[in-house]
Amino acid sequence: MFSRSSLGAFALGLALAGTPVNAEGVCDIYAAGGTPCIAAHSTVRTLVDGFTGALYRLTRGSDGAYGYVTALPNGVANISIQDAFCQSTTCLISKIYDQSGSNNHLYQAPKGTAATGPETGGHDFLASAIGAPVYVGDTKAYGVFISPYTGYRNNKINGSITGDDAEGMYAIFDGTHYNGRCCFDYGNAETDNSDPGNGRMEALYFGNGGYKGSGDGPWVQADLENGLFSGASRAKNEDNHSLNSRFVTAILKGKANQWALRGGDATSGSLTTMYSGKRPNSGYNPMQKEGAIVLGIGGDNSNRAQGTFYEGVMTKGYPSDDTENKVQENIVAAKYGTAGLVAAKFPTEFSKGSTISLRATTDCCSNRYIAHSGSTVKTEAVSSSSSDDLKKSASWVVHTGLGNSACYSFESVDTPGSYIRHSSYKLQVDKSDGTTQFHEDATFCPQTGINGDGHYSIRSWSYPARYWRHFNGVGYIAGNGGPYDFDAKYSFNDDVSWAVTKGFA
């Protein structure tokens, strides 16, 4: 996040007002095609022509206050509101507003029958407000970065699609952020957070799990409950191609004994039909959809998946291919583009390839540095007179991020080939095993220090609501408030702000 005064943020908002990204919203296109939106969600742009309400709500870490992000005249989120509201603290996306007029907003997901992980009072985590920066046209915005155990839901939908009634949906996802766990979904789900049987949901899934398509994934699939389907059956569908573009358009639609999957690059080209045909056997014809809406989780709150969501809608009725093709044209015209993940680069002398040490800035501990003993990351009092072994244990080589080249990874000086990574929210030093999981766990993104004293805060790339923190002398990735002792709000800003110095060794 950026340090700006409210006045500066307001001026930035005026400067970014820009040319309208689209004169017509995707929901206007669907309505013209006879399949109106019953829900429309986006944290990056308006999806309905003339929409002037809030796109999403922020919850501020310092005091729990709410902030509301609306759109600029060009239809893109006015993040200067967020920058000012979240200055010198953290923010989470606590509500995603429905732009369709049906009030089908998305909220923090409650616990379901399949929930595992954090003890958050029965709820999933909320997404960081800065985890998924993006450009729409020439204007910066933020998507919804879903880490494992993060999710949104609404079980009481106005005008919901139930039973075997026809519906359609699309979403824009990050084609590089996914895993094979269940379930990174957007769409129709159960209303009681459970799994009562086949055919009770119809939602877009994106990842490399399920019944597979051609290549190694990720694939656009349908979560129909108890099955992530690429096609007509529980078998590989070679026509369902891997979609690796940075921004992916994913489409699912269904009606009586008929459903289809379509997808493509959200920045160029047309849609490809991955499947169009009859329903799978064994409980999927007729469907018994229940009509809730989920984002980032399965119908029973299966919440181990990850992904990034930028926008999506659900419609009443089965959209025509022609309508969806016009929607794709609208999406391409929006000009999605990548934005930098690092909000504050290390000084030039501490750039990638250099060796650094990181000093705590909390009053109690300002002589202590990030160090390790074996695999345990902790803080140690280090000075020029310390032993060579201690100096080496508190020195780190800065590398291009193993899991994302826009961020950083930190190799131990005294244990070459081993890196700081997180595991069960603890920081530890382990030898790289070359897996995607390790690379993601060992990737971190610096930003201006949250305590505002010219230091640096270092957030996890894969859990961007969590930052390097020292707590009782041990290193964690911590949230600003949460279910664990190390998430305590007391002294959070100072505990997650570090002075970067030349490496002791």
Image (spheres, grey):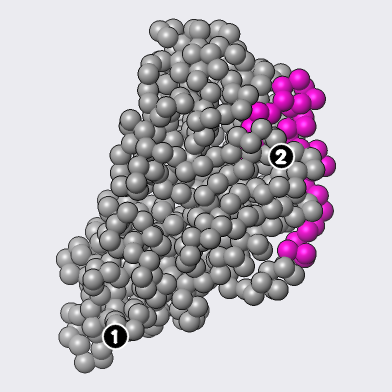
Find numbered disc 2 in the image and state the secondary structure of the residue it sits on. Answer: loop
**Residue 178 rendering spot, x and y as whole percentages:** 45, 41
Q: Nearer the viewer, residue 50 or 447?
A: 50
Q: What residue would you read off at disc 1?
A: 367
What is the magenta range? 13-41
Sequence-first tag of 1 and 2: 2
Q: Residues within 10 Å of mark 2 (few under 14, many from 20)?
A: many
Residue 264, image x, y percentages: 62, 32
- Establish if 26 lies above or below 317: below
* Towards the viewer: 391 or 92: 92
The residue located at (73%, 32%) in the rendering is 27
Image coords of residue 344 (percent x, y)? 53, 71
Element type at mark 1: loop
| Quarter containing the C terminus | bottom left
Count residues near mark 1 (Cα–Cα under 10 Å), then give few for <14, some for 14-19, many for 20+: some
Work out whether residue 491 can be spotted: yes
Residue at x-position 27% and y-position 69%: 471
Residue at numbered disc 2: 47
The relative height of residue 69 versus residue 349 in the rendered view (above or below) is: above
